[in-house]
Image (cartoon, rainbow, N blue to C red):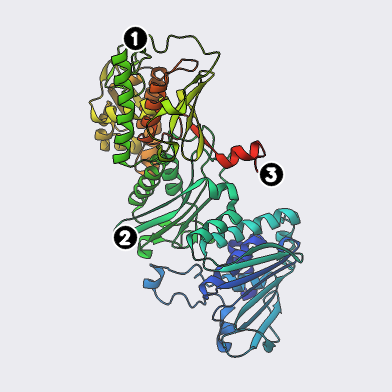
């Protein structure tokens, strides 16, 4: 063992750099956050060789006074906190006071600044590896700050060799630029790489300009296929845009979440968003979002990680439920909306058709309850809901060779201009798709997928309102668990009972299951209960029981909905369209696929080159 010795300040800074400076993108993030904290409304970034050769960040913020420049490069020196109370309610992006000295210790560093708006006379402090022997020198500098970092890790070869290719490092820098650009729409941000422009965003203030900027950063397709949401409670507020379930990604690469302006990653938030998208997202796909949460700074700990990527919420369960409810409600409303009064009017039109057909015996023996007036109140012994089976005569016809067509005059006393969102049916194509006309053009509906969602939502409501049938076990099932899991099972007996489970603690490290819900007789109860306990341990809540139950209801809805290649009358098609307009999440089937698409008249004109 060597003798204990005091490390030199330069070595201490280089060690601290290991926590803050991982690659050029880490440096860029710290400098951009400092610029925003300085009140900048315009930031310019210049990169060379992916940031490995040069990173230059210029801003028009308030600058640093001359007598504080040397102090700005000292460890544990900051203007953003001064006491413990400040640390407990951080409102700035950076506050540790280690970024600049750490960056300077592993690069050729210069800091030029001016805090006088009426003068271009500033000061510069430059040095290699944290050595600023020349001290302060006068320089020409507009009001604001310019930080230049060259030859990153030139004096730490062991760190430099772990850097990747120029292209890879540039991609990491671009990811940082996108996160910063999304966090502040009121700041103009430009970036150049090797002399070529790679980002140029003007500051915006209107909603339309915000959507355009969002399209520049996240892609035009996301901007067009996302919905705006906003919700607030007493001390928490969230706003932003989330992708429609039909616009999803193969990986979680388009997910941005901000807490008080800080981009973060958090398991509680990720879990809440995942639950909000359940039932509507295709298997193995990820949603896209750009969400901004505002919360009392005293309710969140942003000092949980050296790079400040992670935070801790003092009321994690409350935040989790608030986010899940807000996003879930926004997704539930992704249906062709129609006002309640108008909906009743359109339903009366459909009812008139049905009554006329019955009086005139136009289709003797047909039963229209299978579409427009589904009654899924009871479940038959075989597992199929009563009242949603296909009517015996209306759907017994073989698959169509030709579509059913109805003239516009027979369609409705209303014109296309005052039609409901999904319009009025005009034909059925190949026994699979419903063709309808609305004010914008042509609507194409997947009739099985749409009816499946309608029946599924009705089954969920009926299940929530009624009592769940349970099945006592002849031989109680004993499961060996940890002491903590056994305590959780005992503590959350009411949660299990809500879904038909009777669970008791049996000793220190085991639980016994005496009763299970009838719908889950074929499920792996052992694995299901273990998954629930794991969720309770990590998140304080669990949706595994509800998910398992909903999976059964989804299967039942699939078997109880109208099948493909079945002949529907115009009356039944219109009834299905009206149901879709008043059913939550009707834009997607139970598996996350779209149930309808719109082709506008302009799109149809382009297909046939009309007007060209």
Residue corresponding to mark 1: 364
* Front one among 341 and 236: 341
Marks 2/1: CA distance?
61 Å
Quadrant the N terminus occupies = bottom right
Marks 2/3: CA distance?
56 Å
Give coordinates of residue 20: x percent, y percent.
Answer: 59, 63
* Front one among 312 and 287: 287
Q: Residue at point 23% right, 27% down? A: 466
Cβ–Cβ under 8 Å for marks 1 and 3: no
* Front one among 382 and 409: 409
Residue corresponding to mark 2: 235
The reply to whether residue 170 is in sight is yes
The reply to whether residue 460 is in sight is no
Give coordinates of residue 508: x percent, y percent.
Answer: 30, 33
Residue corresponding to mark 3: 612
Camera-near label (1 vs 3) is 3
* Left or right side of 568 for 470: left
Q: Is residue 125 above or below residue 19?
A: below
How many discs appear? Answer: 3
Quick one: SS at disc 1? loop
Camera-near label (2 vs 1) is 1
Q: Residues within 10 Å of mark 2 (few under 14, many from 20)?
A: few
Give coordinates of residue 447: x percent, y percent.
Answer: 46, 24
């Amino acid at each position: 063992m060597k003798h204990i010795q005091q490390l030199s300040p330069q070595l201490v800074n280089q060690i601290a750099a290991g926590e803050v400076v991982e690659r050029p993108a880490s440096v860029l993030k710290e400098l951009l956050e400092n610029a925003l904290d300085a009140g900048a409304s315009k930031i310019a970034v210049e990169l060379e060789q992916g940031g490995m050769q040069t990173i230059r960040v210029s801003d028009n913020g308030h600058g640093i006074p001359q007598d504080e420049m040397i102090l700005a490069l000292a460890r544990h020196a900051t203007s953003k906190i001064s006491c413990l109370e400040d640390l407990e309610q951080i409102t700035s992006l950076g506050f540790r006071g280690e970024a600049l000295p750490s960056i300077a210790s592993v690069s050729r560093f210069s800091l030029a600044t001016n805090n006088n708006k009426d003068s271009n006379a500033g000061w510069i402090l430059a040095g290699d590896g944290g050595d600023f022997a020349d001290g302060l020198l006068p320089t020409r500098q507009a009001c604001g700050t310019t930080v230049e970092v060259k030859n990153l890790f030139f004096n730490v070869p062991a760190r430099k060799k772990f850097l990747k290719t120029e292209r890879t490092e540039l991609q990491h820098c671009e990811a940082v630029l996108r996160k910063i650009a999304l966090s502040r729409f009121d700041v103009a941000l430009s970036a150049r790489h090797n002399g070529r422009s790679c980002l140029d965003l003007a500051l915006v203030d209107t909603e339309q300009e915000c959507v355009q900027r969002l399209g520049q950063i996240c892609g035009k397709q996301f901007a067009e296929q996302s919905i705006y949401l906003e919700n607030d409670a007493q001390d928490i507020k969230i706003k932003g845009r989330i992708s429609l379930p039909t616009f999803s990604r193969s990986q979680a690469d388009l997910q941005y979440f901000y807490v008080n302006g800080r981009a973060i990653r958090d398991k509680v938030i990720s879990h809440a968003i995942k639950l909000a998208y359940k039932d509507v997202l295709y298997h193995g796909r990820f949603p896209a979002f750009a969400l901004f949460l505002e919360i009392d700074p005293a309710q969140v700990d942003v000092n949980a990680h050296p790079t400040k990527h992670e935070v801790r919420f003092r009321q994690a369960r409350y935040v989790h439920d608030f986010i899940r409810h807000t996003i879930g409600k926004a997704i539930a409303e992704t249906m062709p909306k129609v006002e309640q009064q108008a909906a009743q009017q359109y339903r009366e039109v459909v009812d008139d058709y049905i009554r006329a057909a019955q009086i005139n015996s136009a289709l003797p023996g047909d039963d229209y309850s299978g579409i427009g007036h589904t009654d899924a109140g009871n479940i038959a012994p075989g597992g199929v809901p009563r009242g949603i089976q296909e009517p015996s005569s209306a759907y017994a016809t073989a698959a169509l060779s030709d579509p059913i067509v109805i003239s516009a005059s027979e369609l409705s006393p209303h014109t296309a201009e005052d039609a409901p969102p999904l319009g009025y049916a005009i034909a059925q194509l190949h026994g699979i798709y419903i063709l309808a006309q609305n004010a914008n053009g042509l609507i194409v509906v997947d009739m099985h997928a749409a009816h499946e969602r309608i029946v599924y939502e009705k089954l969920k409501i009926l299940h929530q309102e009624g009592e769940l049938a349970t099945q006592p076990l002849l031989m109680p099932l004993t499961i060996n668990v940890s002491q903590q899991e056994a305590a959780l099972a005992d503590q959350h007996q009411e949660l299990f009972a809500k879904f038909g489970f009777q669970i008791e603690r049996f000793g220190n490290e085991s639980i016994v299951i005496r009763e299970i819900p009838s719908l889950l007789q074929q499920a792996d109860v052992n694995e299901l209960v273990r998954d629930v306990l794991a969720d309770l341990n990590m998140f304080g809540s669990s949706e595994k029981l509800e998910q398992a139950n909903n999976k059964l209801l989804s299967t039942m809805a699939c078997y109880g909905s109208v099948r493909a290649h079945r002949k529907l009358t115009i009356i039944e098609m219109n009834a299905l369209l009206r149901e879709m307009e008043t059913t939550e999440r009707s834009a997607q089937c139970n598996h996350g696929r779209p149930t309808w698409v719109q082709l506008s008249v302009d799109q149809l004109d382009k297909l046939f080159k009309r007007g060209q």
